Amino acid sequence: MSTFDRATHEIHTRRWGRNLGLGLVLVCFAAIVFGLTVAKVSTGASMEAFDHVARPALIPAD
Amino acid sequence: MTDASLYDRTAEPEFGDYVTLLKPRVMSLVVFTALVGLLVAPTPVHPMIGFAAILFIAIGGGASGALNMWYDADIDAAMKRTRKRPIPAGLIAPDEALGLGLVLSGISVVMLWLASNAVAAGLLAFTIFFYVVVYTMWLKRWTPQNIVIGGAAGAFPPMIGWAAATGGVSIESLLMFGLIFMWTPPHFWALALFMKSDYNDAGVPMLTVTHGRDATRRHILVYTILLVPTALAVAFTPIAGPVYIATALILNAMFLMGAIRISRRDDAACEADSHAVEKKFFRLSLWYLFLHFGALLADGLIARLAPGVF
């Protein structure tokens, strides 16, 4: 059995930093979308929209 | 124009290099003016929606910065000030910058639409198009009035912030646009008078080179004369209060005096005091914009938090 010793190169540190940064950006993006959803729901924004199915609730009342 | 073979990636970029591609210093001005536009609007906005709107406006601005760096990599490589930017430094490949710019443009416009409304998103999309296509690709290398036209791109953020809150465009938001638009030429030409720049070597026509320094001084005065009524007109709209009126009166008098002083000088006078008047005018121009928008914000907050104070 051979042991494979891989030294950490400066490039690996840079890549790790880049991946960590991107990961944090994605987590923040998910948090913002969640936050926006909560804000829209709590301020009573329209929950339904046209999705190729007749939705009587979307028709304005006379 | 970029040629991929000229700017091959030679080093491993860090996360911060991608952030540099988004021109964070320009983004800070975008965030501030867009925030003022959003907060002075008569329609209150949910804090989360307001935060998201400002964030996506900033990302849209950053995306246009990345697209600008992609297209202008040859200019950046030729000038000392910009030589260390990620593309000419060989850290990020041009295609990567193009991809990042396009993806972030799309995300910012769609997300601003979802967070606020179609008008704000449409204005953001137009701003990106204007900065990248009209300014960067078309007019920047063609006319010495490039600063004037480029200023329009920087003037849109308060209009977008206003549209994110109200869903429309109004005289107030147009005047906020006009304030930044008219302020940009005197601000940058004052800088051009005392900064030794290598724009000319890079093939970008600058007014100081194409028309001379005397013409630039006259241009500064003319644009300042046009700026003053624009700034004072804001005082007659409902978003302005006593803080703005006082600020505008003092700053416009100072700014106009500075422009007149510059217009009366010649190169010998500039050399004699190492461009002291131009440098002072440039520093004043930074305070000018910051304090005008700060005053609008102050009046807006006073009206909302303590109505009836004035």
Image (cartoon, rainbow, N blue to C red):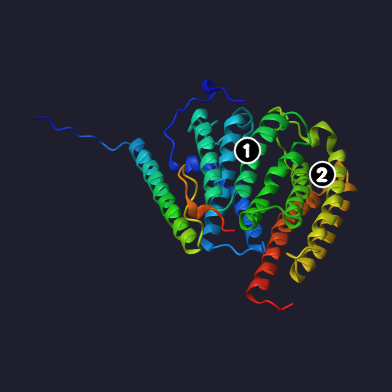
For the question of whether residue B21 can be seen, the reply is no
- Give the chain of mark 1: B
- Type of the residue with mark 2: Glu
> Can you name the residue that lies furthest to the top here?
B5
Q: Residue at x 88, y 47 (%)?
A: B263
Residue contact between numbered discs 2 and 1, judged by CB atoms under 8 Å: no
Q: Residue at x 76, y 54 (%)?
A: B175
> Residue B209, how many percent across, how many down?
80, 33
Question: In the image, which disc is placed on residue B81?
Answer: 1
Q: Is residue B251 left or right of residue B162?
A: right
Whichever of labels 2 and 1 marks the residue nearer the N terminus, that label is: 1
Which of the 4 quarters of the picture holds residue A1?
top left
Looking at the image, which is closer to me, B272 or B243?
B243
Q: Is residue B109 left or right of residue B40?
A: left
Closer to us: mark 2 or mark 1? 1
Q: Secondary structure at mark 2?
A: helix
> Residue B229, how many percent across, how many down?
85, 56
> Residue B189, how many percent across, how many down?
77, 43
Question: In the image, which disc is placed on residue B271?
Answer: 2
Mark 2 nearby-residue class (10 Å; few <14, some 14–19, many ≥20): few
- Type of the residue with mark 1: Arg
Q: Secondary structure at mark 1?
A: helix
Looking at the image, which is closer to me, B90 or B70?
B70
Quarter of the figure that contains the C terminus of chain B? bottom right
